[in-house]
Amino acid sequence: METMKRRHFLALSAAAATVSRSKAAEAETPLVSFGLTTDVQYADADPQGERHYRESIPKLKAAVEDLAKQKLPFTLHLGDMIDRDFASFAKILPLFEPLGHPVWHLLGNHDYTIADERKISVAATLGMPADHYGFTVSGVRFLMLDTNEVSTYKHPEGSKEDLEAEAAMKAMGSANNAKPWNGGTSPAQLQWLEKELAAADAAKTPVLVCGHHPLLSEAGHQAWNNRDIIKLIESHKSARAYLCGHNHAGEQVVSNGVPYLNFKSILHEPGVTAYAVVRLYQNRLVIEGRGREASREVPLREWE
Ligand SMILES: [Fe+2]
């Protein structure tokens, strides 16, 4: 009898160990991994201060060669593909092709330092389905914001949208982000974001929200209506983190358990790159940085 009890106990222990091992394995398997580049900001122009425009080409080629070996499902570019001049898109976009997987883009302020008549075609040139959009990979939802929607650079000079943005910036007074290279979202885009996050909460779908402009810190690079977006992100637990570019120095801020990750631009320091492989787990993000982008682990807030 004693032996049977012992056998039963051993069998139960073995089963428990299997469950615990599979839970541990599950915790160790990323929900999704992807490549991340931002602010390539290419121009066929001489360096200006810390901005080495032509260097972006060899750096991007090397980054693509590395990322292509990682067997990733996709790569993100978080805006400012070019510095100026619409023709630069045709020089840079083919450099992503050796990845052999989709590249999902965001719009950045510099992508609009082009002739007014070209502005309508930037999103299509970047292969974006819309100026703001969502996509899902391996059960993780990516919400790609357009933080240039209300701005003084996105719309042709003198257009209704342009005049409204000029007035909105004036109304911000002496706010440190009331700058013509920053912008914000419309109320309609906020409603879209709220609807997406509410649906993701209900479906228990993890979301990474991405935008070109930072939301935090508030040192002056942040989107005009950063607090409206933060409020939505922090009130929906499906929103795991916010990823952005724009501030080339990069930054990491955590607010109410949500990491706001500003990735570094590849543009600075000749011969030194900046990009990452990002792995999202249930309870953390793992950033495998290259060059100026530091490798680190970022805890995420609890989510039942
Ligand atoms: Fe930017």
Image: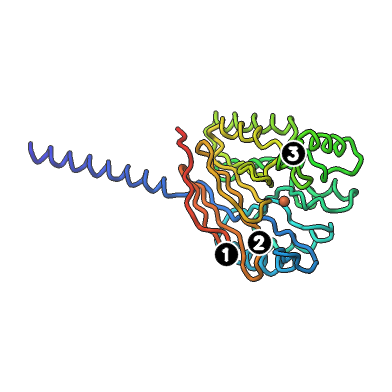
* Amino acid bearing label 1: Gly
Disc 2 on helix, strand or loop?
loop
Q: Where is residue 47 in the image (x, y as percent from the top left)?
A: 75, 67
Question: Could you tell whether 164 is left or right of 127 in the image?
Answer: right
Q: Residue at x 79, y 33 (%)?
A: 171
Give whichever of discs 2 and 1 has the lower sequence position: 2
Q: Which mark is residue 291?
A: 1
The answer to whether mark 2 and mark 1 are in CB contact below 8 A is: yes
Q: Residue at x 27, y 41 (%)?
A: 16
- Whether 266 is drawn above or below 8: the answer is below
Q: How far apart are marks 2 and 1 (CA)?
A: 9 Å
Near mark 3 (Cα within 10 A), the count class, few <14, some 14-19 or many ≥20, is few
Q: Could you tell me which quadrant the N terminus lies in?
A: top left
Is residue 164 in view? Answer: yes
Question: Could you tell whether 105 is left or right of 4 in the image?
Answer: right
* Amino acid bearing label 3: Ser
Q: Where is residue 87 in the image (x, y as percent from the top left)?
A: 84, 60
How many labels were placed on the picture? 3
Q: Residue at x 58, y 48 (%)?
A: 261
Give whichever of discs 2 and 3 has the lower sequence position: 3
Q: Check disc 2 and report the residue beneath it.
A: 266
* Amino acid bearing label 2: Ile
Q: Could you tell me which quadrant the C terminus lies in?
A: top left
Instruction: Give the quarter of the image for residue 180.
Output: top right
Disc 3 on helix, strand or loop?
loop
Is residue 130 in view? Answer: no
Q: Residue at x 64, y 45 (%)?
A: 219
Near mark 2 (Cα within 10 A), the count class, few <14, some 14-19 or many ≥20, is many
Q: Which mark is residue 174?
A: 3
